[in-house]
Image (spheres, grey):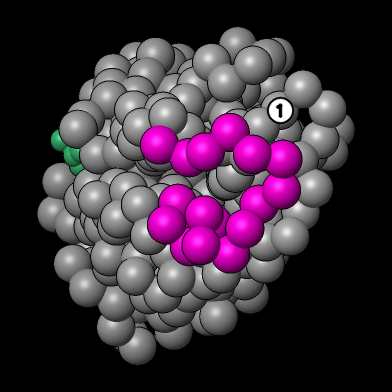
Amino acid sequence: MFENLGNKLQDILERLQREKTLTDTQVKAAMREIRMALLEADVNFGVAKEFVARVSEKAVGQEVLGSLDAGQMVVKLVHDELIQTLGGESKQPVLKTEGNVVFMVGLQGAGKTTSTGKLAKFYKEKGRRVLLIAADTQRPAAREQLRTLGNQVGVPVLEVANGETPAQTRQRLNEFQQTDFRDLVIVDTAGRLQIDENLMDQLADLQTALQPTETLLVVDAMTGQEALSVAKTFDERVNLTGLIITKMDGDARGGAALSARFVTGKPIYFAGTSEKLTGLEPFYPDRVAGRILG
Ligand code: GDP
């Protein structure tokens, strides 16, 4: 019944006595181990603490149900709570027939431009008429990179010129739409190495001009502790509607996903699984729950 269980939980399961009610001592011992496992997976410290408190509250005094013993019951509670915290079921953005504008936001290097190309391919293959907007005027090679990706996928790319105002970009988009109508516009916005006010102001101005229907934060799975403050700040300033976790093909166990989801409450729609355009998959909370527990 626990196919995705990590070794850590298996160990705890074996150590716990096979009793019929969960005692305070049992739960405490198990939760110490769970907290360690979360920290090792780079889950933010505060999130790990709160997560453990939440599960403990549910666990203590709980009657052990049916054929389960006490150990299995703790494991089930932790596993279920992790999946719930990661969003429960796998979800996809709900797009309208037309008028979809998706903003891709995030720090430089998170994989924003790459993910923009991947989404273009994903939605083109679903029959969408996609237009890309290269609005990352911050990173020198970003616009050229997006142009190349657009060519590979076979979708047009509108490039924002240096010094162009958001209103001018809106105007150019309107003109484009009149000659070559697109039902899905994906905007690769500017990132910075660190969050700063200037970046947030710029993003907010572009949002006002282009009125996105989705604003997706691209988070690097390797980010670790910092994922929490990045997600929190972006959500406060530009109102995120969802998340994409990149570089899940690396060594990172996925703690960044848990932290970002925990602090924003927004769904994680996709996981990046390679540098290639094909490296985009739906995000499956149950799989990542197992991976976080190692
Ligand atoms: P941006 O500054 O956020 O636009 O970042 P880029 O899209 O340029 O990506 C930064 C680096 O991460 C590049 O070398 C990408 O090839 C790489 N990258 C992006 N997404 C993934 C992913 O899901 N897996 C792996 N392995 N590499 C990725």
Relative depth, front residue between 141 and 161: 141
Relative depth, front residue between 231 and 132: 231
Q: Which residues are magenta?
A: 15-31
Residue lying furthest left: 140
Relative depth, front residue between 56 and 156: 56
Mark 1: secondary structure: loop
Q: Quadrant of the C terminus?
A: top left
* Residue 104 appears in the picture as rendered: no
Left-right relation of 218 to 61 = left
Disc 1 marks which amino acid?
A: Leu
Q: Is residue 190 above or below residue 74?
A: below
Residue 184 x %, y %: 66, 36
Magenta highlight on residue 22: yes
Q: Is residue 220 above or below residue 205?
A: above
Left-right relation of 67 to 236 = right
Q: Residue at x 48, y 40 (%)?
A: 16
Q: Residue at x 67, y 61 (%)?
A: 60
Residue 23 x %, y %: 62, 58
Q: Quadrant of ligand 1?
A: top left
* Residue 8 appears in the picture as rendered: yes
Residue 266 x %, y %: 64, 57
Q: Residue at x 22, y 73 (%)?
A: 194
- Which residue is tagged 1? 68
Magenta highlight on residue 274: no
Q: Residue at x 27, y 65 (%)?
A: 225
Dot 1 crowding, Cα within 10 Å, few <14, some 14–19, many 20+? some
Residue 280 x %, y %: 44, 23
Q: Quadrant of the N terminus?
A: top right
Mark 1 CB within 8 Å of ligand 1? no
Left-right relation of 175 to 193 = right
Relative depth, front residue between 105 and 269: 269
